[in-house]
Amino acid sequence: MISFGFRIQTIAFILFVALATYYCASKNYLVVNYQLPSEPVTVQETEISLIFKDQRTEQILVTQSAKSALKDFSGNFALIVASGNKNERLLGAFSLSSMMETIFRQRFENAGVRVAPQNESRPTAVEIILKEFKLDLIKRKWVVQVTYQANLLEEDRFKGGQTISGNAERLRVVGSKDAEMVIGELLTDAVNRLNLDELFDSSGS
């Protein structure tokens, strides 16, 4: 007769193998979680046009070492946006450019600023220029870097801007989960560091 202890060990082993297989299974996209900030609505601007430009000097999203670890990654992302009350919304699948534009749109609308549809222009526009975005795997650590510039335009004239840079790293344990976490953490920090009051105040300078 098989002992109760042996049965427990067998079940535990099966569960371990199942979980390891689940987390190691490759997929062709990365899940990015962006956390909206809890910020008072103090911005005076009511509606803007949002312009996004990808001006990275290196168009490669992931280095060769990161690509080898991610295997089937196609360069697409599944974006989940969470608000202060932990309400999470899956917004869909995006390329890097469309994901970044969507994140900034969410950030502005969260602060009470309406963003005009892409096919409509407004006198006031915010131009987001992505300068750098790269995911690397260095000595079992996921390393991600991002740099962008946010410019305020009035009737196509530059009024002021901010440049935000950041980097983060996380130990790779298994699969792509840790890569997804470090990307989400860095984008949350970098996007939320944009000072909207300061940006819109530059219109009067």
Image (cartoon, rainbow, N blue to C red):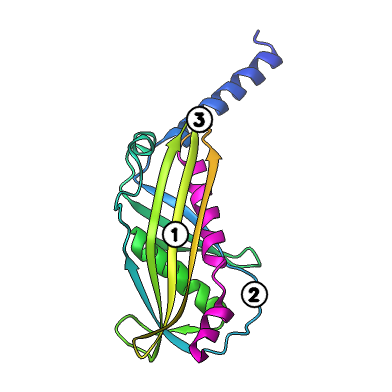
Amino acid type of the residue tagged 1 in the rendering: Thr
CA–CA distance in space, label 2 to label 3: 39 Å
Amino acid type of the residue tagged 3 in the rendering: Ala
> What residue is disc 3 on?
20
Secondary element type, mark 1:
strand
Q: Which residues are magenta?
A: 176-205
- Which of the labelled discs sits on residue 39, or is there none? 2
- Which of the labelled discs sits on residue 52, or is there none? none
> If you read the primary sequence from the N terminus, does the residue marked by circle 2 or circle 1 appear first?
2
In the image, residue 147 sits, relative to residue 153, either above or below, namely: above
In the image, residue 115 sits, relative to residue 79, either above or below, namely: below
CA–CA distance in space, label 3 to label 1: 34 Å
Residue 200 located left or right of residue 151: right
CA–CA distance in space, label 2 to label 1: 23 Å
> What residue is disc 1 on?
147
Q: How many marks?
A: 3
Density class for disc 2 (Cα within 10 Å; few <14, some 14-19, many ≥20) is few
Closer to the camera in the image, 179 or 79: 179
Rendering coords of residue 13 (x, y %):
58, 21
Judge whether residue 204 is colored magenta.
Answer: yes
In the image, residue 85 sits, relative to residue 40, either above or below, namely: above
> If you read the primary sequence from the N terminus, does the residue marked by circle 2 or circle 3 appear first?
3
Density class for disc 3 (Cα within 10 Å; few <14, some 14-19, many ≥20) is few
The residue sitting at 63% across, 85% down in the picture is 42
Residue 129 located left or right of residue 104: left
